[in-house]
Image (cartoon, grey):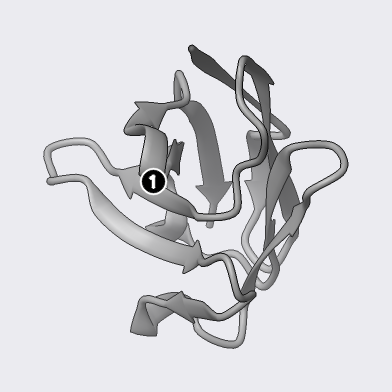
Amino acid sequence: QVQLVESGGGLVQAGGSLRLSCAASGSFSSINDWTWYRQAPGKQRELVAFIISGGSTNYRDSVKGRFTISRDNAKNTVYLEMNSLKAEDTAVYYCHANLFGVWGQGIQVTVSS
């Protein structure tokens, strides 16, 4: 069983930065495939970024050049570095361990304009 715990969210002014973390615990050997999603009020959950086992990454167009996904296999943790934040980035952010089908609890990111 895998559990994911997110941290690092909060309130930031437009143009600021936040770093989200998602740490995994439980019974597993390694987690190499991760995805970050977000869900804004009244909107569907959307994919933000993913990283796969070989290290390749991909991002939704609206965050390219501003967000960076990375992982630390030794810590079983995935990160989302978010820079130049905009009001439209406001949402609850969720991490997902792809091959295990497990979600984090979600963490609020609020960007004030």
In the image, is 11 to the left or to the right of 106? Answer: right
In the image, is 37 to the left or to the right of 33? Answer: left
Residue 19 against residue 49 in the figure, above or below: above
Count of numbered badges drawn on the protein:
1
Most distant residue in the front direction? 29
Three-letter code, disc 1: Asn
In the rendered image, residue 22, in percent from the top left (x then y), is placed at 65, 34
Q: What residue sits 53% from the left and 57% below the top?
A: 113
18, 30: nearer the viewer: 30
In the rendered image, residue 81, in percent from the top left (x then y), is placed at 71, 60
Most distant residue in the right direction? 74
Q: What residue sits 64% from the left and 75% below the top?
A: 55
Q: Please give the residue where the numbered disc 1 appears in the rendered image.
A: 98
Q: Could you tell me if residue 31 is visible in this image?
A: yes
In the image, is 85 to the left or to the right of 96? Answer: right
Q: What residue sits 44% from the left and 53% below the top?
A: 35
Q: Is mark 1 on a helix, strand or loop?
A: helix
In the rendered image, residue 6, in percent from the top left (x then y), is placed at 62, 27
Residue 24 against residue 79 in the figure, above or below: above
In the image, is 31 to the left or to the right of 47? Answer: right
Bin the neighbour count of mark 1 within 10 Å (Cα to Cα): few under 14, some 14-19, many 20 and up: some
In the rendered image, residue 85, in percent from the top left (x then y), is placed at 60, 64
Residue 3 falls in image quadrant: top right
Residue 8 falls in image quadrant: top right
Residue 68 falls in image quadrant: bottom right
Q: Could you tell me if residue 20 is visible in this image?
A: no
57, 41: nearer the viewer: 57
Q: What residue sits 60% from the left and 87% below the top?
A: 65
26, 60: nearer the viewer: 26
